[in-house]
Image: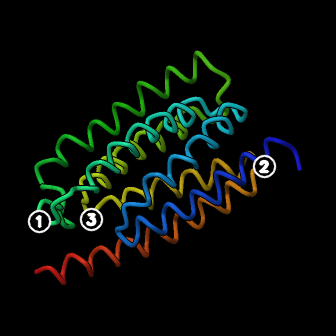
Amino acid sequence: MSNLQVIEWTGVLFGVLSVIYAVLGNKLTWPIGIISCIAYFYFHYDQKYYFSMGLQAFYIITCIGGWMEWHKKNPSEEKGVSNVPLWHYGIYIPAIAIGTLVMGYFLDIKTDDPKPYLDTFATVLSVLGQWFLIRRYLENWLVWVVADSVYCYLFFVQENLPSLLLFLVYLVFAIVGYFQWKKMQQEVR
């Protein structure tokens, strides 16, 4: 097994553990996620998915923030599962489209990224999904379903079997996470 494969499998293992903890609403999702992000930072660099590599750096920072947000000392301060306010969609949808087009164009003309617009679209969605997860918005899981589907395609065409399998697992967990969090949300009401 090559060093890159060891790094990729490390990212896979810790990524799966992190998402399991996220589905359960457990704060261990964050420190375990950091390990996966570090591994995938190096892996994406090797694969020339530059925005996905940068996304891993963003994830490391947001994992620290998420860990702090979810680690409130006073349980009454903890925010339960909620929904994205409807008016926010008027901001998020155009931002996704514009961000994908502008950054995808940049990647297309300035890098050797094999799928610049898909890489960018998945990255933009992942930033939004991570923000929604930190805020404990139920819709984070729907954003992850789309982003994970795009990543599945990207890893399929690059023939990265471990990462493809990881993102298929992420996709399943995103669907399970949606229903689990919906249930948690209804139990509070």
Q: Which residue is mark 2?
A: 6
Residue at 66 percent across and 31 percent down: it is: 45
Of the two numbered discs 1 and 3 in the rendering, the one whose residue sits closer to the viewer: 1
Q: Position of residue 85 (x, y in %)?
A: 12, 55
Q: CA distance from mark 1 to mark 2?
A: 42 Å
Return the disc, 1 or 3, that comes first in the chain's sequence: 1
Check disc 3 and report the residue beneath it. 138
Mark closer to the chain start, 2 or 3: 2
Other residues around mark 2 within 10 Å, as few (<14) / some (14–19) / many (≥20) = few
In front of the other: 73 or 51: 73
Does residue 50 sit above or below 72 in this rendering? above
Mark toward the start of the polypeptide (1 vs 2) = 2
Three-letter amino acid code of the residue under disc 1: Ser
Q: Secondary structure at mark 3?
A: loop
Residue that numbered label 1 is attached to = 76
Q: Nearer the viewer, mark 1 or mark 2?
A: 1
Give percent across and percent down for residue 84. 18, 56
**Horizontal relation, residue 129 to residue 153: left or right:** left
Residue 172: % across, % down: 52, 71
**Left or right: where 78 falls relative to 95:** left
